């Protein structure tokens, strides 16, 4: 599915997949060596993350149930921990530079489809 910053009218990702079950949510990007520029992972029911054992840095966006941006973190390197964003319901993990290219800011409305 695609991810769009509806507030700004910018396509953010052309290939986003959703991890909404226990094992895919736990594994996340840990088995991957990189993400292509057009890829993203949406982890449902996740308001904090770690990058332990990851092999590459990522951009991370925390969103509410209706995909309104609650927090953004750019260039999160491996072996980091981001504490819970209490107003967030899900996390979207993307290649570094995606937040900047998509002009994603707190309060923006994202849309997937």
Image (spheres, grey):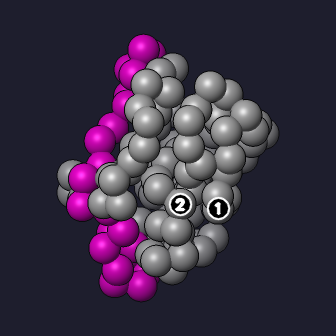
As for residue 14 lying within the magenta part, the answer is: yes
Q: Residues within 10 Å of mark 2 (few under 14, many from 20)?
A: many
Which disc, if any, is residue 96? 2
Query: Measured from the top left, where is residue 39 in percent x and y?
Result: 33, 53
Element under disc 2: loop
84 with respect to 13 (left or right): right
Label annotation for residue 74: 1
Contact (CB < 8 A) between labels 1 and 2?
A: yes
Image quadrant assignment for residue 110:
bottom left
Mark 1 or mark 2: name the one nearer the start of the chain: 1
Specify whether 91 is left or right of 40.
right
- Quarter of the image for the C terminus: give it: bottom left
- Badge 1 element: strand
Magenta-span inclusion, residue 78 = no
* Numbered range of the magenta stretch: 4-25
Q: How many labels does the image show?
A: 2
């Amino acid at each position: 599915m695609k991810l769009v910053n509806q507030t700004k009218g910018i396509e953010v990702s052309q290939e986003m997949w959703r991890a909404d079950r226990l094992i895919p949510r736990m594994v996340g990007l840990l088995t991957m060596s990189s993400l292509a520029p057009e890829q993203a992972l949406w982890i449902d029911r996740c308001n904090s993350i770690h990058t332990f054992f990851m092999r590459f840095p990522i951009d991370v966006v925390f969103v509410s149930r209706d995909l309104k941006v609650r927090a953004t973190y750019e260039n999160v390197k491996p072996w980091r921990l981001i504490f819970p964003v209490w107003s967030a319901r899900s996390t979207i993990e993307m290649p570094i530079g995606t937040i900047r290219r998509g002009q994603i800011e707190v309060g923006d409305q994202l849309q997937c489809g």
